[in-house]
């Protein structure tokens, strides 16, 4: 069975380097292309040497469009606009793509749905196996605790994360809201200040922390009078996202066109 050839976008970034190392250590896949921004001084560097696993024979390139014959699937954890441009390129050339980019607008998510008519896409706000298990647990907890409990979502990330709340926290909110028959856009509270009055039981609160080098902590709190239930996931190493993304790549091989989630990849749906 031939190996799936992967193109890593944002190859010189923290996650990009993690992906390259994970691919090099997985005999079921191989690195086909490594893309970095056109103004990077690392263009032309061997991707394997960049991450310290030895030469892989794949040099950092400035454009995904220039290496379309060298990959089968793209891994993209970059920015919404850049991701959408890569989705369109994949659509044009019949390539699949695994997306972990956060901060996509509703319109941009619609564009993903449209592209998924022609190509296979895995899109998830978090590729961690543990986080996706938590997503499943939240459905049950929300249904059981909703009658009496107030629901709050607390997340913490490193100082350089540019979007808030995190995509994972928002997904948690959407799962919880859906489980109890609410619309997150109507019930979410993203900050409190001053005299806010008595808490509305129907709301779902979000608290965001940005500090230091925190990789990612998420807690959903169900608090009623006399007891609290907390469902928490803490990431201590970004390798969990790389492992999850590669699991998605392998699962996606030969799948028909469609928009899939990590819940699909893990058989949790």
Image (tube, rainbow, N blue to C red):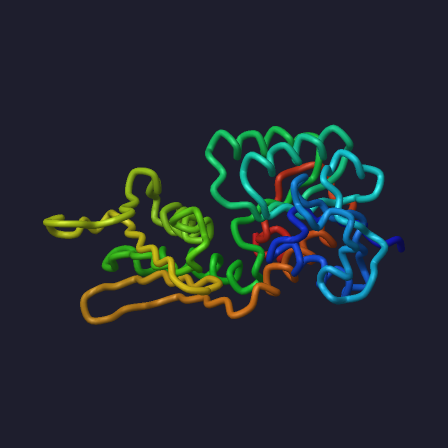
Left or right, 207 with reference to 199: right
Left or right, 238 with reference to 55: left
The residue that appears at 20% across and 71% down in the rendered structure is 226
In this view, the residue in front, 179 or 230, is 230
The answer to whether residue 118 is above or below residue 120 is: above
In this view, the residue in front, 47 or 107, is 47
Left or right, 250 with reference to 153: right
Residue 211 percent coordinates (x, y): 38, 61
Residue at the outermost right position: 1
The residue that appears at 80% across and 44% down in the rendered structure is 71
Residue 137 percent coordinates (x, y): 45, 61
Query: Is residue 7 something one can see in this rendering?
Result: no
Residue 224 falls in which quadrant of the image? bottom left
Query: Is residue 95 something one can see in this rendering?
Result: yes
Left or right, 14 with reference to 141: right
The residue that appears at 25% across and 56% down in the rendered structure is 147
Residue 66 falls in which quadrant of the image? top right
The residue that appears at 34% across and 55% down in the rendered structure is 208
Residue at the outermost front position: 41
Residue 125 percent coordinates (x, y): 52, 49
- How many discs appear? 0
The answer to whether residue 103 is above or below residue 3 is: above
Which of the image's four quarters has the N terminus?
bottom right
In this view, the residue in front, 19 or 43, is 43
Residue 109 percent coordinates (x, y): 52, 35
The answer to whether residue 244 is above or below residue 254 is: below
């Amino acid at each position: 069975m031939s190996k799936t050839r992967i193109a890593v976008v944002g190859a010189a970034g923290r996650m990009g380097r993690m992906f390259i190392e994970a691919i090099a250590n997985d005999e079921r896949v191989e690195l086909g292309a490594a893309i970095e921004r056109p103004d990077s001084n690392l263009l032309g560097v061997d991707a394997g040497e960049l991450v310290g696993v030895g030469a892989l024979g794949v040099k950092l390139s400035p454009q995904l469009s220039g290496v379309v014959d060298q990959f089968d699937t793209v891994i993209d954890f970059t920015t919404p606009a850049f991701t959408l441009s890569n989705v369109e390129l994949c659509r044009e050339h019949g390539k699949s793509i695994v997306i972990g980019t956060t901060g996509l607008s509703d319109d941009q998510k619609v564009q993903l749905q449209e592209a998924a008519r022609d190509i296979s896409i895995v899109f998830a706000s978090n590729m961690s196996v543990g986080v996706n298990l938590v997503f499943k647990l939240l459905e049950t907890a929300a249904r059981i605790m909703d009658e009496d409990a107030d629901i709050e979502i607390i997340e913490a990330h490193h100082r350089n994360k540019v979007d808030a709340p995190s995509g994972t926290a928002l997904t948690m909110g959407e799962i919880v809201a859906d489980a109890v028959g609410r619309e997150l856009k109507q019930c979410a509270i993203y900050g409190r200040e001053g005299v806010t009055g008595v808490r509305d039981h129907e709301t779902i609160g979000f608290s965001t922390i940005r500090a230091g080098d925190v990789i990612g902590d998420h807690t959903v709190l169900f608090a009623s009078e006399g007891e609290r239930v907390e469902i928490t996931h803490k990431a201590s190493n970004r390798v969990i996202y790389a492992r999850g993304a590669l699991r998605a790549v392998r699962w996606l091989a030969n799948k028909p066109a469609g928009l899939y989630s990590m819940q699909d990849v893990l058989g949790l749906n």
